[in-house]
Image: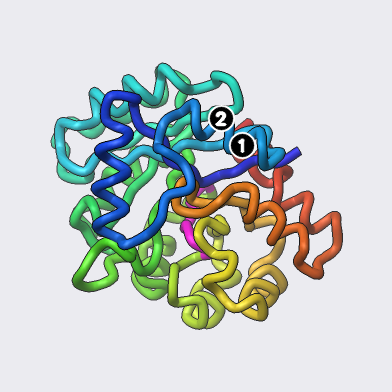
Amino acid sequence: MIIDFHTHAFPDAIATKTIEYLMDKARLPSFCDGTVSCLRQSSEEAGIDISVVLPIATRPGQEKTINKFACEINNTERIVSFGSVHPKSENYKEILDNVKLNGLKGIKFHPDYQGFFIDDEKTYPIIEYAAKLGLIIVFHAGLDLGIRGPIRCTPLRARKMLHQIGYDKIVLAHMGSHALSGDVLDILCGENVYFDTGFTFGKMPDSHIYDIIKVHGEDKILFGTDCPWDSQKEDVFYFNSLDIPQEVKDRILYKNALELLK
């Protein structure tokens, strides 16, 4: 079994336009057209049983449309979807209550696209309320290739937030922090947090991947691709080619995710 804990998809009506915009912004190729049907096909070709879709509300008030779409695709063929909330939405409790009520297992924050620093204390009540509801909380972490300006979720800032919140269902994407793997090893490994492998293979030195798995522990690593920005099939092949025991691979490929999603 394989669970991809980090993917993206959009409603058919806006998928093409959204992917083209993001490709231009980040100067990245896309391995899928952004539709759910393409993600399903990609998952099937890669041997992935479940792809977790992580939507992002980029402005307050956008949550209604995004979370409606999330509910429509959640628990359909090969798809589990999380919801989203914008940190500047005053009615965040109502939004998160509805996320929970509608059976969505978690939410995704993107500090760069949503315009906040992960250790900004103004956002802590929102994170704490999501934690109170038992939701899985995923954060984009590290550099985003499509965003100029300061990195809003560095390992140091993330550690400060983790110590404040004290919650065991937080995931930092991109192996803890894209483009800052040395700091992940020095600052984040050993903390009570999950890392996903989205947009990691071929970007981070394999030596750092091995070290993070060893130091942080395989029980806190989730397989992810960041599809459509990486190829699911190629990432599955890459991960399976790593020189780590099969029991460790199994924990990362699906067992840890199953425990989180139950």
Q: Are the two marked residues, 2 and 1, in contact with CB atoms closer than 8 angstroms?
A: yes
Query: Relative to the observer, which residue lies in front, 60 or 226?
Result: 226
Magenta span includes 6: no
Q: Which residue is mark 1?
A: 43
Q: Which residues are magenta?
A: 169-175
Residue 92 seen from this side? yes
Report how far apart the C-alphas of labels 2 and 1 lie in the structure.
5 Å
Please determine whether, in this image, residue 221 is positioned above or below residue 206: above
Rendering coords of residue 174 (x, y %)? 49, 61
On screen, residue 253 versus residue 93, left or right, reads: right
Q: Amino acid at mark 1?
A: Ser
Q: Which residue is depicted at the point 32% across and 43% down?
A: 19
Q: Which residue is depicted at the point 32% across and 20% down?
A: 68
Rendering coords of residue 132 (x, y %)? 41, 37
Q: Which residue is depicted at the point 49% across and 26% down?
A: 37
Please determine whether, in this image, residue 190 is positioned above or below residue 35: below
Q: Which residue is mark 2?
A: 40
Secondary structure of residue under mark 1: helix
Secondary structure of residue under mark 2: helix
Q: Which residue is depicted at the point 69% across and 61% down?
A: 238
Rendering coords of residue 254 (x, y %)? 71, 43
The disc at residue 113 is: none
Rendering coords of residue 201 (x, y %)? 59, 65
Q: Would you identify the image quadrant in which residue 29 lies?
A: bottom left
The quadrant the N terminus occupies is top right
Query: Relative to the observer, which residue lies in front, 155 or 56?
Result: 56
How many numbered discs, if any? 2
Q: Amino acid at mark 2?
A: Arg
Please determine whether, in this image, residue 223 is positioned above or below residue 184: above
Query: How packed is label 1: few (under 14 Cα within 10 Å), some, or many (20 or more)?
Result: many
